[in-house]
Image (cartoon, grey):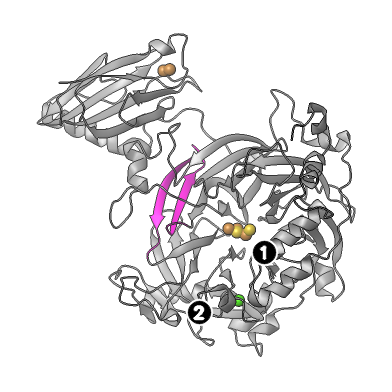
């Protein structure tokens, strides 16, 4: 069906199109969305999902241009916040500016990226190699980005992001906004929620979502009750696994308190089932809380420490069983998802997902439970208000209010925590979001400095919100103004299509971050190349130096081409190799001007990487094709950029 160009100014253009095509006549767009989501439910969950279809939603209010203007950042002006987003299936992490919602950078993490040469350069290949087999990994699934904390707020030093696809944790150093470490978490599948300690840079806690045999060596296959699931503590600085705790059930989203006492996880499969019916059978699952002090003590003394498989290097504490002293299992309804700690550090909020409720749990009650001062762990829950169908995650404004994303209803619900604790209906406002929100987050929400300015609703479905790009839709990250202190303060101001699928985003003041504009040539990132060149110097009785040397060194069938790039020439006009040589090309960009990046692309060889000012990068490969192969610069660096090319000659 052809449409006139003026249709694009009406938000219902595609709606009419769909109805005319008879796809879902007589059903409003929002109702259809709920029906389509609802029909996904089976077994015990079905009734709950079906109920969602009958809720009638108010029409979306028209936005005045005055409100929309709030996201406008004029040319040449800077945003006031950074947003750090996970990339989901893309396996990357993203850096954006807010309130403009402009995307600045996609930091490659578990994915392949020629801009950085991620998966191409020796540095990135070492990080991406599987810890056990050395195999080059190519696939990632990043969900949760969290920044490092000192004294309960962001210190701008690191960011961490999970890989659900392989059970890994990556660290991004924020001084250069690049990955500098990737850690494989042994015996973990579906590593999902992660959270760093908030009192100081200390540890990052990682949750396995999937239960699997321990060890997973084929000796156990068919007795799922014997599978296990681990909560892993990774040292924030060394990025080494410190310990793991074996739990009952499984672990989904992660949070830590503000004092280094607890990490915690939601558990949606307390049933320890292996299919949907089994996983949704119980009315309550858990918030699983880890007593860090007791665990660290046990790890130190060796008491209660076990080992899994041949990983004798990693202490594992057995946290299974209702009355072990390391792990507390607090019953909460039903297949809970998000857990968030409010900015005062007083409450943990667990979202019900299959229950329309959020559970409010004071951390003081957790103290009591571990001290044996309460009757049953369920007594930790002091309020369980209804907030809508399918609550997933909660953000905070620093004024005592919580904002929970409601998946099935496609709304964001604002509610007051103190009112809920007082036993009254705490809901203050609901606004429609388009559609099916996953995470919601607010500016500085995960810190003691939550400032209550902006909210981002990261919606899984964009449906009719954008020009069609075929059956793979962008997500829709919606930006909501919450700066007013009125009860009903949420105003939707911006739709931002997002390349699938950002799960979570952290919104933080720009003043926290001071990334460098050019590399320090002495940085540890180039240790490998620097050491290699030092050894070559020694062995060959030459004075070779990164950034100065332009020379090809041959040692047997190994060839080392050390060169500079300086706009618009490479330091070597040619590199001559023999077929079968193992060639290492080391490029140092000696331009010291900001934003003057060069690239190195070797025609026909799957080699393409960028080299930022004062950076060194290297690649090692086999010269397996005779002939003349041009290598050329891939970043437009100079008026003579196109002339920046040399020959790789293989005889
Ligand atoms: S999850 S939509 Cu991967 Cu953070 Cu909750
Ligand atoms: Cu160097 Cu283009
Ligand atoms: Ca369950």
Task: Determine the residue positioned at 75% across, 51% down.
Answer: 23
Residue 341: mark in rendering: 1
Residue 195 point in image, percent of width and height: 55, 60
416 up-or-down from 378: above or below: above
Residue 515 point in image, percent of width and height: 54, 35
> The C terminus is located in which quarter?
top left
Circle 1 packing at 10 Å, graded few (<14), some (14-19), many (20+), is many
Q: Could you tell me which secondary element the residue under label 1 belongs to?
A: strand
Residue 280 falls in image quadrant = bottom right
466 is within the stretch colored magenta: no
What range is drawn magenta here?
Answer: 165-186
> The N terminus is located in which quarter?
top right
On screen, residue 58 versus residue 136, left or right, reads right
* One can see residue 286 in this view: no
Residue 236 point in image, percent of width and height: 46, 56
Q: Earlier in the sequence, mark 2 or mark 1?
A: 2
- Of residues 341 and 85, which is closer to you in this image? 85
Residue 366 point in image, percent of width and height: 63, 77
């Amino acid at each position: 069906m052809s449409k006139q160009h003026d249709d694009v100014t009406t938000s219902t253009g595609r709606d009419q199109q769909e109805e005319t095509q008879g796809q879902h006549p007589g059903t409003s767009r929002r109702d259809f969305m709920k029906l389509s989501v609802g029909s996904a439910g089976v077994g015990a969950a079905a009734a709950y999902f079906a109920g969602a279809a009958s809720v009638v939603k108010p029409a979306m209010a028209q936005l005045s241009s005055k409100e929309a203007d709030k996201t406008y950042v004029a040319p040449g002006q800077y945003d006031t916040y950074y947003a750090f987003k996970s990339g989901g299936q893309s396996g990357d992490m993203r850096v954006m500016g807010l309130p403009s919602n402009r995307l600045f950078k996609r930091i490659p993490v578990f994915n392949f990226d020629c801009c950085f040469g991620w998966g191409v350069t020796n540095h990135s290949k070492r990080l991406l190699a599987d810890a056990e087999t050395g195999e080059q990994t190519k696939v990632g699934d990043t969900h949760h980005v969290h920044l490092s904390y000192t004294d309960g707020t962001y210190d701008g030093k690191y960011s961490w992001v999970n890989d659900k696809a392989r059970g890994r944790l990556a660290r991004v150093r924020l001084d250069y906004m690049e990955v500098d470490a990737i850690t494989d978490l042994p015996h973990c599948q579906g590593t999902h929620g992660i959270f760093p300690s908030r009192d100081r840079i200390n540890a990052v806690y990682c949750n396995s979502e999937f239960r699997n045999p321990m060890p997973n060596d084929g000796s156990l296959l068919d007795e799922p009750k014997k599978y296990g699931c681990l909560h892993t503590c990774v040292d924030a600085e060394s990025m080494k696994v410190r310990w793991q705790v074996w739990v009952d059930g499984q672990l989904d989203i992660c949070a830590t308190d503000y004092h280094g006492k607890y990490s915690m996880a939601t558990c949606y499969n307390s049933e320890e089932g292996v299919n949907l019916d089994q996983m949704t059978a119980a009315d309550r699952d858990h918030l699983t809380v880890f007593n860090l002090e007791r665990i660290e003590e046990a790890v130190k003394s060796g008491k209660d420490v076990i080992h899994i498989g041949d990983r004798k290097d990693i202490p594992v504490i057995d946290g299974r069983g209702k009355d072990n002293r390391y792990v507390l299992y607090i019953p909460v309804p039903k297949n809970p998802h998000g857990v968030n700690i409010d900015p005062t550090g007083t409450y943990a909020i667990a979202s019900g997902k299959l229950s329309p409720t959020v559970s409010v749990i004071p951390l003081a009650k957790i103290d009591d439970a571990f001290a044996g001062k309460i009757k049953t762990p369920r007594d930790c829950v002091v309020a369980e208000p209804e907030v809508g169908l399918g609550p997933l995650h909660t953000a905070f404004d620093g004024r005592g209010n919580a904002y929970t994303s409601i998946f099935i209803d496609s709304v964001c619900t604002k509610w007051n925590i103190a009112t809920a604790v007082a036993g009254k209906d705490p809901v203050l406002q609901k606004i429609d979001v388009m559609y099916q929100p996953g995470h919601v987050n607010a500016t500085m929400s995960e810190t003691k400095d939550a400032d209550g300015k902006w909210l981002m609703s990261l919606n899984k479905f964009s449906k009719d919100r954008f020009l069609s790009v075929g059956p793979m839709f962008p997500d829709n990250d919606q930006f909501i103004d919450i700066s007013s202190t009125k009860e009903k303060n949420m105003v939707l101001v911006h739709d931002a299509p997002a390349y699938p699928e950002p799960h979570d985003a952290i919104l933080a003041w720009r003043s926290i971050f001071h990334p460098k504009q050019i590399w320090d040539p002495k940085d540890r990132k180039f240790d490998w190349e620097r050491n290699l060149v030092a050894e070559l110097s020694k062995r060959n009785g030459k004075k070779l130096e990164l950034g100065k040397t332009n020379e090809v060194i041959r040692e047997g069938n190994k060839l080392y081409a050390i060169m500079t790039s300086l706009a618009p020439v490479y330091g070597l006009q040619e590199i001559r190799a023999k077929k079968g040589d193992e060639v290492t090309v080391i490029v140092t960009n000696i331009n010291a001007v900001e934003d003057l990046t060069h690239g190195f692309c070797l025609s026909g060889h799957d080699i393409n990487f960028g080299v930022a000012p004062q950076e060194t990068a290297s690649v090692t490969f086999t010269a397996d094709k005779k002939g003349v192969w041009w290598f050329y610069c891939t970043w437009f660096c100079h008026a003579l950029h196109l002339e920046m090319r040399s020959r790789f000659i293989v005889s």
